[in-house]
């Protein structure tokens, strides 16, 4: 039981460090804009299709 708690504590600690690193990246990134990759792809060519999102 003690070993499980140690492993669980290490896993939670690693996840906390990763989240802190992501937060620092967001604060320190100079461009201040996170671009999402193109999720709308043409199935025939694999290229990005026109954006279908409508800005309201």
Image: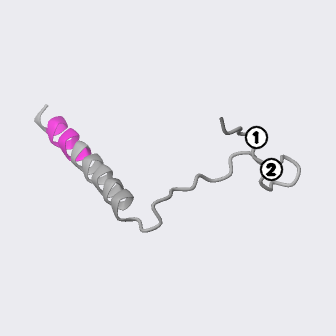
- Residue at position x 29%, y 47% from top? 15
Instruction: Judge from the rendering whether residue 55 lies leftward or rightward of residue 33; answer left or right.
Output: right
Vertical comparison of 31 with 26: above or below: below
User: Where does residue 23 sit, x and y in percent of width and height?
Assistant: 33, 53
Look at the image and give the residue range highlighted in magenta.
3-11
Q: Of residues 21 and 26, which is closer to you in this image?
A: 26
Tag 1, which secondary structure?
loop
Instruction: Work out whether residue 17 or residue 22 is closer to the camera in this orientation and state it.
Output: 22
**Quadrant placement of the N terminus:** top left
Q: Quadrant of the C terminus?
A: top right
Assess whether mark 2 and mark 1 are in contact (beta carbons under 8 angstroms).
Answer: yes
Residue 48 image position (x, y, % from top left)? 77, 54
In-image side of 38 versus 4 (left or right): right
Say which residue label 2 marks.
49
The colouring scheme, among rainbow, by chain, secondary structure or one colour, is one colour
Question: Left or right: 36 with respect to 54?
Answer: left
Q: In the rendering, which numbered label is found on residue 52?
A: 1
Pick out the residue farthest to the bottom.
30
Choose top left, top right, bottom left or bottom right for residue 47: bottom right
């Amino acid at each position: 039981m003690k070993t499980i708690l140690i492993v669980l504590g290490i896993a939670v600690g690693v996840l906390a460090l990763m989240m802190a690193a992501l937060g620092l990246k967001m604060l320190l990134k100079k461009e201040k804009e996170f671009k999402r990759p193109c999720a709308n792809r043409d199935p025939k060519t694999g290229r990005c299709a026109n954006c279908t999102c409508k800005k309201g």
